[in-house]
Amino acid sequence: MANENAPREYNDYVLYEQQGPVSFLKAKMDWAPIDKIHLSFVQHTGRAKGCAQVAHIEAALGVTSPGKESALFLAESVLNGVMSNRRIKSMNYREEHKEQYCNPIFTSNGGSPERNGRPCMWRVVTLAPGMKTDFVLTAVEAEGVVNKLGGYSKKEGSPVTRIAVGMSIEELITFASAIKQAWQAYLVCSGVCVQGNSPRPTAEKSGSASEKGSSSSPNNAPEKSEKGNADIANQLFCVLYDTGFVLNKGFPLFTTHELAVPFVQSLIRELLHSEHKYVADEESYNAAVRFLEKAKEGTCAISFTSKINPSKECSLVIELAYPTVNFAGPQQGKTTA
């Protein structure tokens, strides 16, 4: 019999739950090793009828997917107000054109190949303005086919399963924050980093375990301890990614706060020598340096414009944060629509 008091494995961690009258959503980190946020949608009969399950869709948002479809793009766009602006435009368009529903403001297409006796499946996750709530997150699934581009398309004539979960603006912000924080914590705890900048603390300060004569493991690797976890949690880290998906294919980059400025400068040079030859905006760069010098949690961005095509732009998003080492439990939201 399983021990209910045993700590839950990280890959089983539910980072967010959203309840609706006849549906619910669980966002999970169990697909993190394949760079995906797992979105489990369930439709049921409602509390009055015993909440019997009617349908379910196991969808995903890729973390390293093309920018406009990625989980990090969605999260960042919610937190910086882009999705709220898109919501207003979509609602205005619906009113002007007398349409029944608002157009989606975020769409992520995906699917899965034929395997284990199950046919090829097409899936899409969308975010749109809701009729009874501020937003509605929807998953759609049907039998699919592999298209000419190697992606997935709906098979003509195949029946569609659709599950929608409403969210208020406050709940959507919490959902977006949970995605960003969980992914940052996953990268730190799994040791994913770049430029050889390990997020693990060293024993250089006086009073460290090595100076007190404590035994060390082979290769001088520091022993795991509660103090080590506390040191990690108290260290300020810098998380970076570019919206043009030039650097590391859009995968977040990590370094320590102490090395942030030279690391940013190296990324600026890399963007300048990229295919589109992106040039940093001097004003936003100076603002970013001042932001890093303050050594406080927050987010800023450096704007870039292509020398080859001035209409092509991107940003280098920079966030300072203290990593979450131990998880307190899932965030939950409730909605009435």
Image (tube, helix red, strand yellow):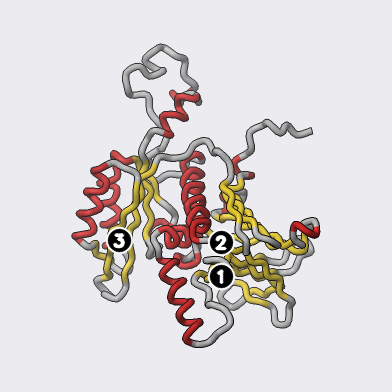
Q: Tell me the CA gap for discs 3 and 2.
A: 37 Å
Q: Is residue 272 above or below residue 297?
A: below
Q: Which mark is residue 130?
A: 1
Give the CA separation, mark 1 to mark 3.
39 Å
The kind of residue on which mark 2 rests is Met
Residue under label 3: 271
Task: Measuring from the top left, give residue 188's x and y in whole percent.
Answer: 46, 41
Residue 167 numbered tag: 2
Of the numbered discs 3 and 2, the one sitting upstream in the chain is 2
User: Mark 1 packing: few (<14 Cα in 10 Å), some, or many (20+)?
Assistant: many
- Residue 145: numbered disc: none
Residue at 56% across, 70% down: 130
Q: Residue at x 62, y 48 (%)?
A: 30
In the displayed structure, 283 sits above or below 225; it is below
Which of marks 2 and 1 precedes in the sequence?
A: 1
Q: Residue at x 53, y 70 (%)?
A: 128
- For the N terminus, the quadrant is top right
- Residue 93 is situated, as x and y percent measured from the top left of the image, at 47, 82
Compared across the picture, whether 22 is left or right of 176 comes to: right
In the displayed structure image, the side of residue 24 where residue 176 appears, left or right: left
Circle 1: residue type: Gly
Secondary structure at badge 2 equals: strand
